[in-house]
Image (spheres, rainbow, N blue to C red):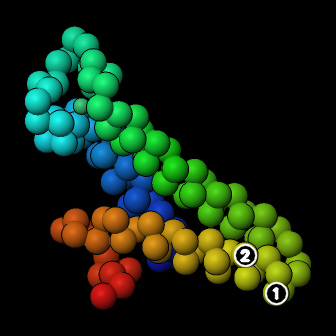
Amino acid sequence: MDPLAQLVQLLREYLEEDEANAPKAHLSHCGTVIYNEEYGPDACDCGYPQQIRDDIAAKRALLDEWENTKAVVAEQEFADGPQAIITAMSQAVAVVAQAYKNRPDFPTRWTDG
Ligand SMILES: [Zn+2]
């Protein structure tokens, strides 16, 4: 598997963790509200739970787009155009990955400084 595909897989795992930790993240963001299992994070109107969901969805959409683009490019014979697109998409994935650069298992090759 190429390094970027590995990074995408790792990012998908991080996003699952983010999703699982969303109630805790909400609680620490919104100190006046005690997260309640029964009512869930939407019991609060601060907007943070939706923000977390939107953030996760946007990152997943980018990863999906990268995979779709890569699959399309792999089917085509043209050299330059599609390859430039996948290069740009790959850079976008690497940029989004920086949100996770402090995780202990984050690959250092993708740390941008
Ligand atoms: Zn809240």
- Mark 2, ligand 1, within 8 Å: the answer is no
How many numbered discs? Answer: 2
Q: Is residue 1 visible?
A: no
Query: What is the quadrant of the C terminus in the image?
Result: bottom left
| Residue nearer the viewer, 32 or 78 | 32
Would residue 96 appear left or right of 26 to someone viewing this image?
right
Alpha carbon distance from label 2 to label 1: 9 Å
For disc 1, the neighbor class at 10 Å (few under 14, some 14 to 19, many from 20) is: few
Q: Position of residue 97 (x, y in %)?
A: 40, 68
Q: Residue at x 79, y 76 (%)?
A: 82
Q: Residue at x 33, y 54 (%)?
A: 14
Tell me which corner region of the image, top left, top right, bottom left or bottom right, holds residue 21.
top left
Q: Disc 1 marks which residue?
A: 80
Q: Is residue 88 above or below residue 56?
A: below
The amino acid at mark 2 is: Ile
The image's mark for residue 12 is none
| Furthest residue toward right | 77
Q: Disc 2 marks which residue?
A: 85
Would residue 34 appear left or right of 85 to someone viewing this image?
left
Q: Is residue 13 visible?
A: yes
SS assignment at label 2: helix
SS assignment at label 1: helix
Q: Residue at x 49, y 54 (%)?
A: 59
Q: Residue at x 22, y 65 (%)?
A: 103
- Mark 1, ligand 1, within 8 Å: the answer is no
Q: Position of residue 19 (x, y in %)?
A: 33, 40
Q: Is residue 48 above or below residue 85?
A: above
Q: Position of residue 94 (x, y in %)?
A: 47, 74
| Residue nearer the viewer, 56 or 109 | 56
The amino acid at mark 1 is: Asp
Tell me which corner region of the image, top left, top right, bottom left or bottom right, holds residue 81.
bottom right
Dot placed on the residue nearer the N-terminal end, 2 or 1: 1
